[in-house]
Image (tube, grey):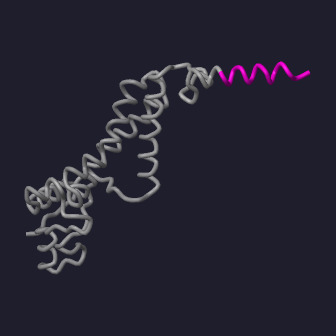
């Protein structure tokens, strides 16, 4: 009997099939970037003559979380998602006084949760923007924590001695102009 997906859940069987196919080591480290898994559902489709399905040895999974687990396990999943989670948490809890940072953080958190239903990671502009915004949020919040309104000449580019030297040089240059 072939499973019908009229308005039903079409993702749960992917979780079941993938986790049934992985052993303990593969759960932590994955099967590598050329890793595949066996799908009982797509084997059944091929046996019954259905032409709408994939191969029963599947190279990709339609769910971003599962794709990361298949290719690199939980280690890869954590390495891939920690910058996004860190940026979202920083932006929501420490960047709340900046509306743009807060909204970008909510967007990143939303994209992270969508990875459990869809959002297959790929080298596209969408994921570039996602990681770019994560870096932007982290940088913004960290700079905000240092000193909210910092004079440029008192920044980390000048230490105390160099600042005094620069100030003396500027004074002497300004005093020589007519």
Of the pair 141 and 146, the residue shown nearer to us? 146
Which x, y percent locates residue 117? 26, 50
Above or below, 127 relative to 52: above
On the rendered structure, is 158 left or right of 101? right
- Which residue sits at x=16%, y=78%? 46
Of the pair 36 and 120, the residue shown nearer to us? 36
Q: Which residues are magenta?
A: 165-178
Above or below, 26 relative to 47: above
On the rendered structure, is 2 left or right of 71? left
Which x, y percent locates residue 55? 21, 75
On the rendered structure, is 49 left or right of 164? left
Q: Is residue 52 magenta?
A: no
Which x, y percent locates residue 57? 18, 73
On the rendered structure, is 19 left or right of 52? left
Which x, y percent locates residue 8? 19, 54
Residue closest to the far right: 178
Figure disc tally: 0
């Amino acid at each position: 009997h072939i499973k019908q997906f009229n308005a039903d859940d079409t993702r749960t069987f992917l979780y079941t099939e993938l986790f049934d196919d992985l052993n303990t080591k593969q759960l932590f480290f994955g099967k590598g970037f050329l890793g595949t898994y066996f799908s009982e559902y797509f084997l059944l489709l091929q046996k019954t003559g259905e032409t709408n399905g994939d191969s029963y040895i599947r190279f990709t999974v339609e769910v971003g979380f599962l794709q990361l687990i298949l290719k690199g396990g939980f280690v890869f999943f954590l390495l891939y998602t920690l910058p996004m989670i860190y940026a979202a948490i920083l932006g929501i809890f420490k960047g709340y006084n900046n509306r743009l940072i807060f909204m970008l953080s909510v967007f990143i958190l939303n994209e992270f949760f969508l990875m459990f239903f869809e959002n297959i990671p790929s080298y596209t502009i969408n994921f570039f923007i996602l990681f770019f915004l994560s870096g932007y949020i982290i940088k913004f919040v960290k700079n905000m924590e240092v000193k909210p309104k910092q004079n440029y000449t008192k920044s980390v580019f000048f230490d105390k001695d160099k600042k005094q030297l620069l100030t003396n040089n500027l004074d002497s240059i300004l005093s020589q102009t007519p």
